[in-house]
Amino acid sequence: MIYEVNPNKLCVSFAKSINDDFFPEAMAVLSGKNPGWVFVDNPETPNTAAVYSIGGEGFLMLGNEDNADFNSSLALFIDSEFKIRLASIGFNCVEISGHPRWNSHIEEVFKYKKLDFCKMFVYRLPDNFPAADKSYSNIVKVNAALLAKNYSNKKFLTDKIESFWGNMESYLKSGFGYAAVENDIICGLCFSAFIQDDICVIDIETVKEYQKRGFGEMSARQLLQECRKRNLKPHWDCMEHNKASRKTAEKIGLEYKWEYKCYDFYF
């Protein structure tokens, strides 16, 4: 069986009981900080969970991967009710990720689909990384003052942040970020997509016309400094084939830590 539950203390306790910081994004959804949906095998004593992050646009699998009843129920649910739910927000693709021990189970359950996957690389900051305090004239903090200005493409920024935080109020209360600006254009954005315990999951995007000008690196360095001030560990993940993202992560001092598979299929 599969049950949908609201994020609550029980969900957080379950996630912490498996002692797994593999997906801090899932923990942030479970705690109610970021928008998403939570599905479990037992609403009272969950053993397995599928956490859908709206910002991350995919399922993150937690708990007992050998739960055959839950796994098959999830597949049926996705093919029926959940497909309609995704269509209502404009999605026609499902992404599913888990710890590597989940791989064979995901492949088995969705073998009837045209299942594809990509490798995701996770980067974090080494403990001995030296502190730095540098500012850049065209990198500005994403706060209420910035939002009050009339940038011609401000919707790019607000849409991106709201996809992870639900609304700008939640972001302004709990998140932080930096934008690269030039005249009245927001050229790029690097911000805290999720914050869970002492981990800050980073999201970064540069407008296509302004790529390869260093905006991503500068905004990321600024965000890194902010993470250090707040005693947060930066968590950066990207697709294996996204060489630009990997290069930026390594250039600002992050180190490769682990990888996992992100599976996807279309309806």
Image (tube, rainbow, N blue to C red):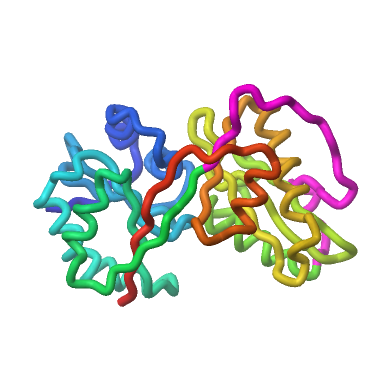
Q: In this view, does 252 lie above or below 97?
A: above
Indicate whether residue 133 is drawn in magenta.
yes
Horizontal and vertical percent for residue 13?
31, 29
The span picked out in magenta is 123-151
Which residue does the image show at 52% across and 61% down from the upper left? 241
Horizontal and vertical percent for residue 66?
14, 44
Q: In this view, does 146 lie to the left or right of 229?
A: right
Give the main secondary structure of the magenta stretch: loop
Q: In this view, does 11 lie to the left or right of 48?
A: right
Indicate whether residue 220 is drawn in magenta.
no
Q: Foreground: 110 or 52? A: 110
Quarter of the view holding residue 32: top left
Which residue does the image show at 62% across and 48% down from the upper left? 169
Q: In this view, does 237 lie to the left or right of 103?
A: right
Horizontal and vertical percent for residue 254?
62, 38
Residue at the far bottom in the pictured view: 267
Residue at the far top in the pictured view: 128
Quarter of the view holding residue 57: bottom left
Q: Is residue 231 visible?
A: yes
Horizontal and vertical percent for residue 78?
24, 65
Quarter of the view holding residue 245: bottom right
Which residue does the image show at 28% across and 30% down from the upper left? 18
- The quadrant in which the C terminus is found is bottom left
Q: How many marks?
A: 0
Q: Is residue 28 visible?
A: no
Q: Foreground: 20 or 249? A: 249
Which residue does the image show at 20% across and 38% down from the upper left? 46
